[in-house]
Image (spheres, helix red, strand yellow):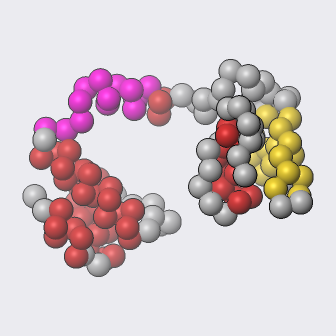
Amino acid sequence: MVAVSEIETMDRPQLIALWQDHFGGPPPKSLSRPFLRRTLAFEMQSRAQGGLPKGFVAKLERAAGGDAPKRSTGLQPGGRLLREWNGVTHVVDVTEQGFRWRDQSWRSLSAIAREITGAHWSGPRFFGLNGRAGG
């Protein structure tokens, strides 16, 4: 088993080879080297401790098995969210599959908020669904 300290010093080809050894396939191409390191380190530590707790695994499987992303109960397909950011009004339509913004489908409001602001945001907070809108 590879130690976490070894993972910290690996270059990208070594990280990809380790990923393939442990997950049986290549990592998604868009994963950054720091994310590869964190994921592999987590996996090594988890395996060293006997794996994830059964309840947590079941929760992950339930979450992965859902067809549609979970939305807050206040959002219904056909709804519309408006948010002004830096003088631009953004309109997001709620659909059966998720959200529609700028003629593209999105699975989460957080991804849209990140695209608008260039920074990580909680989508519900950014659009003011959890009280007052941030920013």
**Is 60 one of the magenta-colored residues?**
yes
Q: Where is residue 29 in the image (x, y as percent from the top left)?
A: 47, 66
Residue 56 higher or lower than 30, as above or below: above
Q: Which residue is drawn at 35% across and 63% down?
A: 36
Q: How many labels does the image show?
A: 0
Q: Give the range drawn in magenta.
A: 50-62
In this picture, is 4 found above or below 57?
Answer: below
**Does residue 50 appear in this view?**
yes
Q: 95 or 85, which is in the foreground?
A: 85
43 drawn magenta: no
- At x 89%, y 52%, the residue is 89
Task: Tell me the residue at 23%/30% (across/down).
Answer: 53
Majority secondary structure in the magenta region: helix
Quarter of image, res 39? bottom left
Question: On the rendered structure, is 84 left or right of 135?
Answer: right
Rendered residue at 84%/30% (across/down): 79
- Is residue 93 rendered to the left or right of residue 36? right
The location of residue 68, given as percent across then percent down, is 62, 31
Query: Quadrant of residue 123 in the image?
Result: top right
* Quadrant of residue 95 within the rendered picture: top right
Left or right, 47 with reference to 114: left
Closer-to-camera residue (110/78) = 110
In the rendered view, does 81 fall on the left or right side of 3? right
Residue 135 x, y percent position in the rendering: 72, 52
Q: Can residue 20 be seen in this view?
A: no
Residue closer to the observer: 20 or 51: 51
Figure quadrant of the N terminus: bottom left
